[in-house]
Amino acid sequence: MNYSIETLRTFVEAASLKSFSATARKLNKSQSTVSSTISGLEDDMGFPLFDRQGRESTLTIAGKKVLSLVEDILSADERLQALRVELSPDIEPRLSCAFSDIYQSPHAEHVLNTLDRQFPHIEFEFLIAENDDVIDMLQNQQAHIGMMESRIEYPADIMFSRLPIQGELGLYVLNTHLLAQEKTITYQHLTMNRQLRLSSSTQTIINSEKNWLAPNYLLLLEMAEQGMGWAILPTWLVKQFGHGTLVSLKYDQWPRKIDLDLVWSKNNPPGKAGYWLINKLLSDNNRVAQDPNKVSYINN
């Protein structure tokens, strides 16, 4: 067989998007190029990988088996490329990270001080983003590494590794708000009062009839302190930046722990300093000494 890594990546994207035209748009190629690439791979394999009869291009039974092996091959290639970068003497001049405000590491100051000593000449950019905004920044090459609330599935071009510690979110409202006076909070209480929520969030945990939006948790905190409504906020953020005017609403299982993932792009992977930071965040938060030249690629 004579296939390239680019061919295999095209196949994986087509399997994920179930559309050759959508794959072409994402990869910035013509549809004919994508179709030709997939057809060439099918010719090499000796059997069809996609069922093209319906409106979507779905994998055949054989195609699903091939996909599993192709993903293993690409994963191995990504690990090899990561190791090549880590062992290279060259260091990227700039490292940009887009992290969720849900996360507050007890080791954050230590990690950044160590980064400064390890890579004293690197330009470091710290960005705050949540949910899909983190993914967009990675895919648009605005950030090299992201940290976000965990999700079940990621785009095919995004790698992730689960952090061993969790964040915590709670329901907060101004202490003079009507909700703060209720002895028992019900779902109806929350839905009939204005929710202050992230503009980037697609969460429907609590679907309020009234919503005001903001791009980050700090702005939501300020809006909540002004009595504009209730909000889902990181508990550490309220404790550190609140002014003692917000109260936590005891509803269902809130406050609740939130899993967090480190994420980065396969198409625009981090450099030597970026992989060092990924390992440092994973090992420090796990409080277990790890080989600094290893990154966990296990997608939990």
Image (cartoon, rainbow, N blue to C red):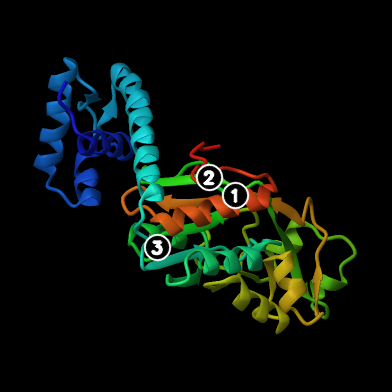
**Is residue 125 or residue 84 the one in the foreground?**
84
In the rendered view, would you say 56 is above or below 103? above
The first of marks 1 and 3 along the sequence is 3
Q: Residues within 10 Å of mark 3 (few under 14, many from 20)?
A: many
Quadrant that contains the C terminus? top right
Give the x, y percent position of residue 177.
79, 78
The residue furthest front is 89
Q: Where does label 1 land, which residue?
A: 282
Lateral position of residue 259 relative to residue 271, left or right:
right
Q: Position of residue 1 (x, y in %)?
A: 16, 20
Q: Looking at the picture, how far across and down is residue 73, in whole percent?
A: 33, 29
Q: Secondary structure at mark 2?
A: strand
Graded by Cα atoms within 10 Å as few (under 14), some (14 to 19) or many (20 or more), the crowding at tag 1 reads many
Is label 3 in a helix, a strand or a loop?
A: helix
* Front of the two marks 1 and 3: 1
Q: CA distance from mark 3 to mark 2?
A: 18 Å
Q: In the displayed structure, would residue 62 be above or below residue 264?
A: above
Position of 167 compared to 158: left or right?
right
Q: Amino acid at mark 1?
A: Leu
The residue shown at (61%, 71%) is 217
Residue at (41, 55) in percent of width and height: 272
Neighbours of disc 2 within 10 Å: few (<14), some (14-19), many (20+): many
Q: Which of pointers 1 and 2 indicates the residue nearer the eye?
A: 1
Judging depth in this view, the residue of 279 and 216 nearest the camera is: 279
Which sits earlier in the primary sequence, circle 1 or circle 2? 2
Name the residue carrying label 3: 137
> Which amino acid type corresponds to the residue marked 3 in the rendered image?
Met
Looking at the rendered structure, which numbered label has been put on residue 161?
2
